Amino acid sequence: MRLAQCAARYRATADSENPAAVLIGLDSMQGLGAARVLASRGVPVIALAKDPHHDSCKTRVCRQIITTNTETEELIQTLEELGRTLARKAVLVPCEDANVLLVSRHRQRLEPWFHVMLPDPDVVEMLMDKTSFYSYAAEHGFPIPATHLIRNRQELEDVMGTLTFPCILKPANSATGLWERNVTVSAFRVADAASLRELYDAHHQLTDVLIVQQWIEGADSDLYSCNTYFGADSEPLVSFTARKLRQWPPHVGKSCLGEECRAEPVLAETVKLLRAVRYKGLGYVEFKRDARTGEYFIIEPNVGRPTGRSAIAEAGGVELLFTMYCDALGRPLPQNRQQTYGGVKWIHLRHDFQSALYYRRRKELTVRQWWHSWQGKKAYALFSLSDPGPFLSDLWRVFRLAISPRRRRQWTKPLRSTP
């Protein structure tokens, strides 16, 4: 939609409504979830998206959807133009890493029109670059897996003798978008030295530094996370702990079924880390529990944005995103900020079907276990009776792919790097 039309439509009702939330990256799972949550609280949502044909852009909860390149400085120019048309200062909600970096680096240009709820720029840069984050964590005694930073092929060969397999290979910084445009997963689980060399040769040009990291033994259900929001005094105003039950692709993918849980070590370590860096805004830290020792290791943080599972907090009665919105505007915070551990679940139906089928074929999951795992109160990644467009669009796209036998095999086959 053109900015002039957007401004006219928004101003027509702005005087009697809450200030807008301007959401960057609607064309993502976390973007859709954030838009739905905020809209359900009576917040007018103006969304920006790079791909207007994305499934998430079929939602009807946004007042307007503006198409712009959300990964380049074109985003900042679009926000400046939009800001000049707004009747009141809006709350900015970046939803992808590239958006967060751009907003952080250009925050002075945006602050006349938007509330920017991010930590200091140096904190954003340090936490988002895995090279600097793992160095910081090691120096300050935070629990991380054994980690090697690989800048060239010789450095890879130098550490080969110290590695145990399987291990993890991932980029140090994926916020540039180059990795996402060329690779369908955020990391590879590598079975042996030959596979590591092959994967390095195929992907080293996509990032300045690759990370080879110890594989922590455990199942998908040993992956825990803490979503939180920190106020201006670097204290947590709300937090929510959960764990994965399954992910797609298996072992190294994104959550497709998760559940609320009590995880005191995860909460304590998250708060300790974010307090230490004087954090502000939405934060997320993922951990893996070593199935052999019970120790928790930090896998990575996410900075200044909602995650795909932010909606599970809302379904569990914890108003994570609305707390951020109210705090940005200096309004009283919502009362529902205390986790009650009711066991609510979050599910991406299609991806969990793929993941469950994979484990079923390996005889690691029975039909009864699968069915039981779906029981209870749930929040959905795409499905919504009141907002069916994204889910139906996803189903239609899958149907078109499924009519091709080759595409159908790809749809159910996990990555070759997953044993």
Image (spheres, rainbow, N blue to C red):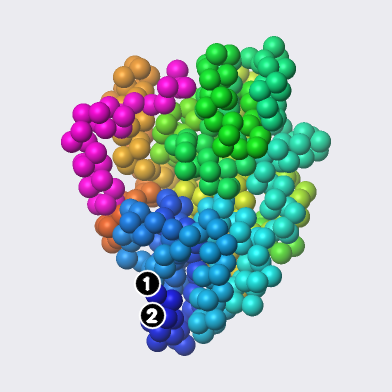
Residue 147: which quarter of the image? top right
Residue 176 position within the rendered picture, expressed as x and y whole percent measured from the top left: 58, 48
Judge whether 39 appears above or below 388 on screen.
below
Disc 1 residue crowd, few under 14, some 14–19, many 20+, Cα 10 Å: few
Identify the residue at horizontal 57%, vertical 19% (top origin).
Answer: 197
For residue 1, the mark is 1
Residue 101 position within the rendered picture, expressed as x and y whole percent measured from the top left: 62, 55
Identify the residue at horizontal 56%, vertical 19% (top origin).
Answer: 196
The amino acid beneath tag 1 is Met
CA distance for labels 1 and 2: 7 Å
What secondary structure characterizes most of the magenta part?
helix
Q: State the SS at label 1.
A: loop
Q: In this view, does 132 lie to the left or right of 201?
A: right
Residue 208: which quarter of the image? top right
The magenta segment is 391-419
**What residue would you read off at disc 2?**
5
Q: State the SS at label 2.
A: helix
Q: Is residue 130 left or right of residue 381?
A: right
Q: Is residue 213 visible?
A: no
